[in-house]
Image (cartoon, rainbow, N blue to C red):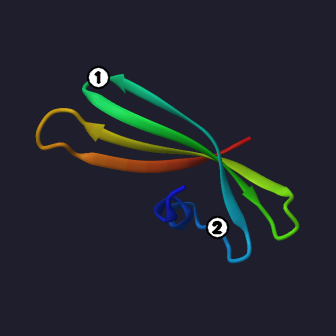
C-alpha cells in the first residue's frame, strides 16, 4: 500500500487503508496498475472501498496519470 494512495484518497487520521486486490491491464499504448483498497475506521469496521489507477504511456514522453474512485 502506498502512502501516496492514502494521501490521494484523503484517508483521515486513525483510519487504515487495507489493500484488497490488484489488477494489471495494457491497452491503447498504456500500462495501467489498478489497486483496490478498503478503508477501515478505528474499530476495524469497513467504511468505504476504493479503486486507484496508475496509468503510464508506453511511448515517449511516458506520461503518468493517477486517479481514484470510491466504489459502491
Q: Report the residue at 25% width, 26% height from top.
A: 29
Nearer-N-terminus badge (1/2)? 2
| Residue found farthest to the top | 27
Q: Report the residue at 35% width, 24% height from top.
A: 26
Image position of 44 (left or right of 23): right
Kindly report the distance in space between the C-alpha atoms of the residues bearing marks 1 and 2: 32 Å
Tag 2's secondary structure? loop
- Residue 7 lies, with reference to residue 57, above or below; the image says below
- Which residue is labeled 1 in the image? 28
Tag 1's secondary structure? loop
Q: Report the residue at 45% width, 30% height from top.
A: 24
- Residue 41 lies, with reference to residue 52, above or below; the image says below
Task: State which quarter of the image contains the N terminus.
Answer: bottom right
Q: Residues within 10 Å of mark 2 (few under 14, many from 20)?
A: some
Q: Quarter-wise, where is residue 46 in the image?
A: bottom right
- Residue 57 lies, with reference to residue 66, above or below; the image says above
Disc assigned to residue 11: 2
Residue 67 placed where, x, y %? 46, 49
Amino acid at each position: 500500500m502506498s502512502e501516496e494512495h492514502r494521501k490521494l484518497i484523503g484517508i483521515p487520521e486513525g483510519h487504515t487503508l487495507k489493500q484488497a486486490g490488484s489488477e494489471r491491464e495494457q491497452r491503447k499504448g498504456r500500462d495501467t496498475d489498478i489497486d483496490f483498497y478498503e478503508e477501515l475506521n478505528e474499530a476495524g469496521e469497513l467504511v468505504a472501498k476504493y479503486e486507484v489507477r496508475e496509468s503510464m504511456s508506453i511511448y515517449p514522453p511516458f506520461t503518468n496519470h493517477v486517479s481514484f474512485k470510491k466504489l459502491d
